[in-house]
């Protein structure tokens, strides 16, 4: 190739690069992208205003370029519902453990819990569960008579292997622990629900749950440390 021809190639390459730059410039001037300032939906457990979703989306590819953006990205990931992080976890890595929680003394905590508040918490379950006597299985099994019922035992429901192989009975403390974070307590179970983080909400819910039976399930004996 003679020098003159190489020159032509050089001009052609530089010319195309210049064209790309120009198109890019004109394109971004002509099309002004409007990013929503508020997320279109709320992810359960995510503290909305703390995380600037729009900003995050704008800077996504470069999100790791500065410390502030890195912190933003981590904040966002931290707030993703546990179930989503669990299903994204590679190589079956279990989601990180939660700090230990002391079990309440159900014998005293359940009678003093707020059943009406528990009924409101139960609205979150109603999209997947029916708890009327003889009611159907829906996305999740019917929960009538849950307290004291063996795990994965409701007729006609196709439980996950994880739920079946855990075994045992739905005692007060098993329900209390499972509902805090279903994905952590029984890894691999298929209840796509992030959990009820606050202990008081779970106690209220369980107090309401006692009405899902012909007669409320007996309370456990008071625990020695539970006397107040
Ligand atoms: C998005 C749907 C969904 C929501 C919401 C949901 N569940 Fe579930 N639940 C399921 C599914 C599916 C299963 C079966 C899990 C398996 O087999 O791994 C299940 C299983 C259960 C079980 C085990 C039942 C058994 O027979 O062993 C309990 C207890 C339970 N759910 C309670 C609740 C409560 C209480 C709430 C509300 C705070 C709730 N669930 C919200 C879908 C849901």
Image (tube, rainbow, N blue to C red):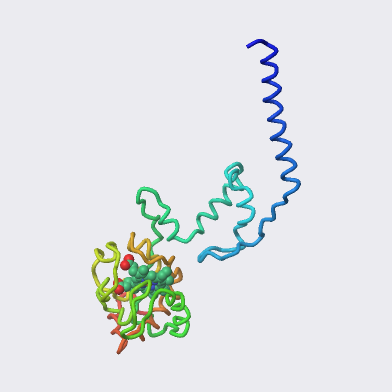
Q: x and y percent of residue 177 in the render?
A: 35, 69
- Residue 174 appears left or right of 64: left
- Residue 4 appears left or right of 129: right
- Whether 22 is drawn above or below 95: the answer is above
- Picture quadrant where residue 171 is located: bottom left
Q: x and y percent of residue 222 in the render?
A: 30, 80
- Picture quadrant where residue 143 is located: bottom left
Q: Quadrant of ligand 1?
A: bottom left
Instruction: Name the residue located 27 percent from the left edge and 62 percent from the top edge.
Output: 161
Residue 103 can be seen in this image: no
Instruction: Name the residue located 71 percent from the left edge and 33 percent from the top edge.
Output: 19
Instruction: Name the residue located 44 percent from the left edge and 56 percent from the top edge.
Output: 85
**In this orientation, which residue lies closer to the viewer: 211 or 1?**
1
Q: x and y percent of residue 98 in the render?
A: 40, 60
- Residue 162 appears left or right of 128: left
**In this orientation, which residue lies closer to the viewer: 97 or 152?**
152
């Amino acid at each position: 190739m003679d020098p003159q021809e190489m020159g032509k190639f050089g001009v052609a390459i530089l010319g195309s690069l210049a064209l790309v730059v120009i198109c890019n410039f004109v394109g971004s001037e002509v099309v002004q992208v409007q990013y929503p300032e508020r997320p279109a939906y709320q992810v359960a457990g995510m503290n909305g205003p703390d995380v600037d979703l729009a900003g995050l989306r704008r800077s996504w590819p470069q999100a790791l370029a500065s410390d502030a953006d890195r912190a933003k990205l981590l904040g966002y990931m931290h707030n993703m519902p546990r179930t989503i992080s669990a299903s994204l976890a590679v190589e079956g890595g279990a989601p990180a453990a939660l700090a230990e929680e002391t079990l309440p003394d159900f014998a005293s905590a359940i009678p003093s819990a707020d059943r009406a508040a528990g009924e409101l918490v139960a609205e979150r379950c109603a999209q997947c569960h029916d708890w009327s006597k003889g009611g159907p299985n829906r996305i999740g099994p019917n929960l009538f008579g849950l307290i004291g019922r063996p795990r994965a035992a409701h007729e006609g429901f196709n439980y996950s292997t994880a739920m079946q192989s855990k075994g045992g009975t739905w005692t007060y403390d098993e329900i209390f622990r499972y509902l805090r974070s279903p994905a952590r307590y029984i890894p691999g179970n298929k209840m796509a629900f992030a959990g009820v983080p606050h202990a008081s909400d779970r106690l209220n819910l369980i107090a309401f749950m006692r009405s899902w039976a012909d007669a409320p399930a007996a309370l456990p004996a008071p625990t020695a440390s539970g006397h107040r």
